[in-house]
Image: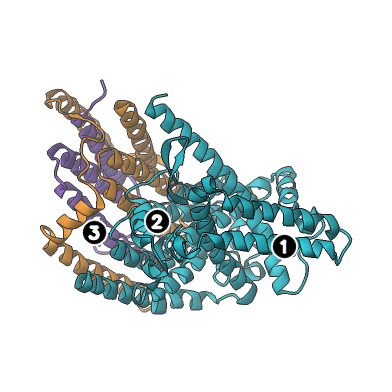
Amino acid sequence: MDPSTWFYAISLIKILVVFGVLMTTLAYLQWVERKVIAHIQVRPGPYFVGPHGLLQPLADVIKLITKEDLLPPYVNKPLYLAAPFIAVSMALLSISVIPFGPEIDVFGYHTYMQLTDLNIGVLFVLAASSVGVYGVALAGWSSNNKYALLGALRSSAQMISYELPLSLTIAAPLLISNTLSLRKLVETQGGNPAHAGTLWNWNLFHGWQWIGFLVFLISAFAETNRIPFDLAEAENELVAGFHTEYSSMKFASFFMAEYANMITVSAMAVLLFLGGWVAPWPAEYGSGLVPVAVFALAGLIAVYHGLHPARRRDRFSLPAAGLVFLFIAAAFLAPFTQSWLLPLFWFCAKTGAILFAFIWVRGTLPRFRYDQLMGFAWKYLFPVAIVNLLATGLGVALFG
Amino acid sequence: MSQVPLSWFLVLSALLFALGVAGFLFRRNIITVFMSIELMLNAVNLSFIAFAYQHKDVSGHLFVFFVMVVAAAEAAVGLAIILTVFKNRATLNIDDISSMKD
Amino acid sequence: MDVILFLIFATIAVVAAVNVVVQSHPISSAISLIGVMGSLAVLYLLLGAEFIAAAQVIVYAGAVMVLFLFVIMLLNAGTETRQSKSETAHLLGVPALLVFALLLAYFIRSQPDSGVHFGGFTGGSAQAVGRALFTTYLLPFEVTSVLILIAIVGAIVLARKEI
């Protein structure tokens, strides 16, 4: 086959794999969130559909698809129908430039673990997220409902305000790495195989960048409309905010958009500050054995609990899960998988840690008041982000 | 034919500019009039980019950049003025906002 | 391929621009204007202006138009009432349209045909734009920052309650 056919074939496969994995992750992120919140609040969470509620996302999807799709008579129809579509497509669009790993070899064909590498990748993600605001704004306006309109107004004001500190903190690591391409960004943080990196090459530990990282995370919480900044859908004041009038799959698309945005923002944080798919320390010192150890330990614990079951239903489910974990641990040891599985593991582990922080904060913090929210963005985050950018620029100019 | 003549871009730009002028003259809602101005600015930007391509020179992009900055500043001030006008007169019709003329 | 791409996005831009002018509700006009800006961004990309294309989407579509939408929602601007048709508009408008069309036709025919081949110019990267911005165009750049400061102050003064 000639190279261009290869290119199309590989790209198509990559798109299918990424899309499938992303959709599954979106569904299971909801499950993870419910479980984590439940355990924070000392209750078991979803438990009845499948072992430990593992099939709950499937049940949710079936429920959402088969629900009646209401179209209120007083809405502005074209915009009402377009809004969830805009929200979800813009949220999924940014995934296409996120690199998950380095260049790999597929049957002798070199390809990147990334759908496409734009040399304006960072700007692309910013652009997609800023267009995503329209999904929320139009949903609220076209619903012709005062709660929805108020939610949309709040959310668009919030997203515009928090986009500024977000962009300014993104600019600081870009100054250090001197590129807009997300892949090169990771390579400057030690992803280059020529000088295998350590923790200290990450942008997070570059001078005072942890301040920028904190501002980025806080803005990211606001940008994705998550607690403590979920003013747009404050249930006890606004019913459900901008998606009050939505039902069935249209409602689900807003949820998908929210979770996809969470994943994108976490991945961006990992790529910008946490070194992307780079292991925290070089493989010569055994970073390659960490995933093996983690999965083997998880598998052994699951098997142990399966042999001493607290509940009758755990007798089969836990050993089965344990065996799956042990199998994954073994997969990490196989030589032909290490080149792509290890970077993928580190990328997913870092992204997962930030996603867990999202859920953790949701289980911990109360909601802001609206004036506090805007005041916080403009009076604290924005100045800090500007000073951070200026100081970083000065540092880069002086010390290269 | 796999090449687009440069003139097509300029014609597109002229069409958009003319539509912007038409909107500016025909519409009575002050916000829509303002949006027509933005449309005209965008039309001019397209010409700049097309000429930048033609001359293989990045300067045209810089002009567009400055136009964008000016447009953003203009939008901030203009919309603040519109809000103030609406607060004082409760109308958005430009025919009703003519006290400087009377 | 280039011609097809150009025609698709040019058509979208023109149709959306017509929509901006003829729609009676400001929200519809605003959405159409976003459509114009989006298709123009694609054309910029095809002309090798990748940084400007991204800036177009981020600044215009992402910030300026959201501001417009925000004001329209806030003021609850309704549909516009049609004005009575004026005689002068007809008398002046039809000849002006004809002159415009003739000029366009003349322009298309007389222009020496220098083709645009997409991908033929790659000097519009963020790096090139930044280099030009901070060397040749440093003074205008600094002046724009003052302009933006003035705009911020102006907007805040106008938004105060007393006026």
Question: Which chain did the image draw in orange?
Answer: C
Q: Are marks 1 and 3 on the same chain?
A: no
Q: Is residue C102 left or right of residue B95?
A: left
Q: Position of residue B66 (x, y in %)?
A: 20, 56
Q: Is residue A254 left or right of residue A275?
A: right
Residue type at tag 2: Leu
Q: Which residue is mark 1?
A: A300
Task: Identify the hue of chain A.
Answer: cyan
Residue type at tag 3: Val
The residue positioned 15% from the left and 28% from the top of the image is C114
Q: Nearer the viewer, mark 1 or mark 2?
A: 1
Q: Position of residue C61 (x, y in %)?
A: 37, 52
The residue positioned 29% from the left and 70% from the top of the image is C152
Evaluate if marks 1 and 2 touch, with contact meaning CB atoms under 8 Å apart.
no
The residue positioned 64% from the left and 50% from the top of the image is A252
Q: Chain of mark 2?
A: A
The residue positioned 52% from the left and 61% from the top of the image is A351
For disc 1, the neighbor class at 10 Å (few under 14, some 14 to 19, many from 20) is: some
Q: CA distance from mark 1 to mark 3?
A: 63 Å
Q: Quadrant of residue A116?
A: top left
Q: Relative to the observer, which residue lies in front, A88 or A45?
A: A45
For disc 3, the neighbor class at 10 Å (few under 14, some 14 to 19, many from 20) is: some
Marker disc for residue A126: 2
Question: Which chain did the image draw in purple?
Answer: B
